[in-house]
Image (tube, grey):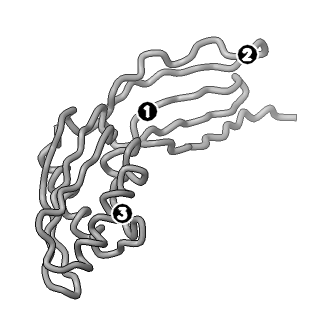
Amino acid sequence: MENTSKSLRIPLIIGGLVLIITVGAGGLILTLSSKNNNTVSTSNSTLGGNGLESIPSNITNSSQYKDGTYTSTGNYDSPGGMEKIGVTVTLTNGVIKSVSVDTGTPSSFDAQKYQNKFSQGISGVVVGKSLDQATVGRVNGSSLTGIGFNEAITKIKTQAKV
């Protein structure tokens, strides 16, 4: 009987990182690398009969955005006409640590009402997420304000790009 050595590779994508698990005759090998080819650091860990022999310990920030506070404006069309919304985000390691919205002078009472609802709920939606995950739809009952917010976030991505 012939002994053939086969292995199985399973890629898992977790928050921008790729974890490749290879199972074969030599045991389990874990390889950690960046999904977007910005090298985080690659480390192999082998699980032998007694458990984990080494673990990746030198993972660094793979963010494609500079830390800082960024402000931009986005526009959106409402039933009352064109509206404008200012957005300020603070980034640390590509993650939104705080967000604020400046509604300026809305064109109507309804626009003001929805922008206020949006600004009251946006922190709970985007704080703690990566800048790339900050695209929103309806927030706190406001559906159109998110269009202007998303436009401002797109501009902020350009400003903050490494």
Q: Nearer the viewer, residue 138 or 133?
A: 138
Q: Earlier in the sequence, mark 2 or mark 3?
A: 2
The amino acid type of the residue labelled 3 equals: Val
Task: Judge whether 95 appears above or below 154 on screen.
Answer: above
Residue at image position (24%, 39%) is 90
Q: Quadrant of the N terminus?
A: top right
Sequence-earlier tag: 1 or 3: 1
Question: CB atoms at circles 2 and 3 under 8 Å apart?
Answer: no
Q: Is residue 49 left or right of residue 59?
A: right
Question: SS for tag 1?
Answer: strand
76 shown above or below 122 = below
Where's residue 47, x and y in %?
69, 20
Q: Marks 2/3: CA distance?
A: 42 Å
Q: Quadrant of residue 84?
A: bottom left
User: Which of labels 1 and 3 is toward the front?
Assistant: 3
From mark 1 to mark 2, how far is it between C-alphas?
Answer: 22 Å
Residue beneath disc 3 = 136
Q: Quarter of the image for the C terminus: give it.
A: top left
